[in-house]
């Protein structure tokens, strides 16, 4: 059995036979699957906070796959999509890929092609979740800084010397050294170069305000 918190592949296809076939393939590959016959069912399901992707049929009742792709984006639901279709064409493929789809497969497709696309989609989602977690950690570190340390940080990453920073904020060079040491420690930076990189990731400019 696959663990409850394992990566999940959502399958939306109104063809029950196709859903069962894909679910069986995913199970054989050790992947957890949740299947739906309509787009709205997926939209209202309880999605676990684990790496996931969506295998989405183009032709669906009520709303087609491309329209649903945009609906998900408008709703702020970011999930990598692998499109499958029985009657794809080049314009349709281009439209899907430009909107961020991982792959566009025409039925009948090879099982391995689908699995490869799914693994690529899951890896993309893992990378996104890792980046989001890292940013959240950095923002927590930023929140731990005192108001004065937050004032000093952009000046430090802009390359100003302690003496120059002291002149900017109206304090002593010794005090700036203390602030600098504290904010480096709190931000988890071992060097100025690393501090600059971390600051850029949370939108702190490396230019003097």
Image (cartoon, rainbow, N blue to C red):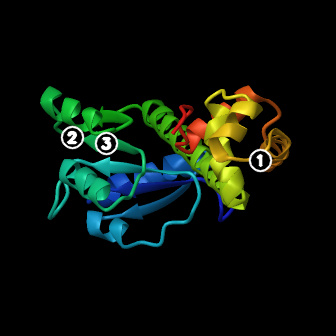
What distance separates the C-alpha of mark 3 from that of mark 2? 10 Å
Q: Residues within 10 Å of mark 1 (few under 14, many from 20)?
A: many
> In front: 91, or 153?
153
Q: Residues within 10 Å of mark 3 (few under 14, many from 20)?
A: many
Q: Residues within 10 Å of mark 2 (few under 14, many from 20)?
A: few
- Relative to 91, is 170 above or below? below
Q: Position of residue 76 (x, y in %)?
A: 36, 59
What distance separates the C-alpha of mark 3 from that of mark 1? 47 Å
Ranked by sequence position, the earlier of labels 2 and 1 is 2
Q: Position of residue 78 (x, y in %)?
A: 41, 52
User: Which residue is drawn at the image coordinates 24% and 52% (left, top)?
Assistant: 70
> Residue 19 is drawn in which quadrant?
bottom left
User: Which residue is drawn at the image coordinates 68% and 45% (left, top)?
Assistant: 152
**Quarter of the rendering occupied by the N terminus:** bottom right
Q: Which residue is mark 2?
A: 86
Q: Nearer the viewer, mark 2 or mark 1?
A: 1
Residue 61 numbered tag:
none
User: Which residue is drawn at the image coordinates 57% and 36% (left, top)?
Assistant: 200
Tag 3 and tag 2, C-beta contact below 8 Å: no
Q: Which residue is mark 1?
A: 183
Q: Secondary structure at mark 1?
A: helix
Q: Position of residue 71 (x, y in %)?
A: 24, 58
Q: Is residue 196 visible?
A: yes
Q: Which residue is mark 3?
A: 83
Ranked by sequence position, the earlier of labels 3 and 1 is 3
Q: Secondary structure at mark 3?
A: strand
């Amino acid at each position: 059995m696959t663990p409850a918190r394992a990566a999940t592949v959502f399958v939306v296809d109104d063809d029950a036979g196709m859903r069962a076939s894909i679910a069986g393939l995913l199970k054989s590959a050790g992947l957890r699957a949740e299947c739906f016959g309509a787009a709205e069912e997926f939209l209202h399901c309880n999605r676990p906070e684990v790496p996931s992707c969506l295998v989405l049929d183009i032709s669906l009742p009520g709303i087609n796959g491309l329209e649903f792709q945009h609906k998900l984006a408008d709703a702020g639901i970011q999930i990598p999509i692998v499109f499958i279709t029985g009657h794809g064409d080049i314009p349709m493929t281009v439209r899907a890929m430009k909107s961020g789809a991982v792959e566009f497969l025409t039925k009948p497709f090879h099982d391995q092609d689908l699995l490869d696309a799914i693994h690529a989609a899951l890896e993309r989602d893992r990378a996104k979740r890792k980046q989001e977690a890292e940013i959240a950690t950095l923002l927590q570190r930023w929140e731990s800084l005192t108001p004065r340390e937050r004032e000093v940080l952009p000046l430090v990453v802009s390359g100003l010397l302690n003496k120059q920073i002291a002149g900017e904020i109206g304090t002593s060079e010794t005090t700036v050294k203390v602030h600098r040491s504290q904010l480096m420690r709190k931000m988890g930076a071992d060097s100025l170069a690393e501090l600059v990189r971390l600051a850029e990731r949370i939108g702190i400019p490396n230019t003097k305000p």
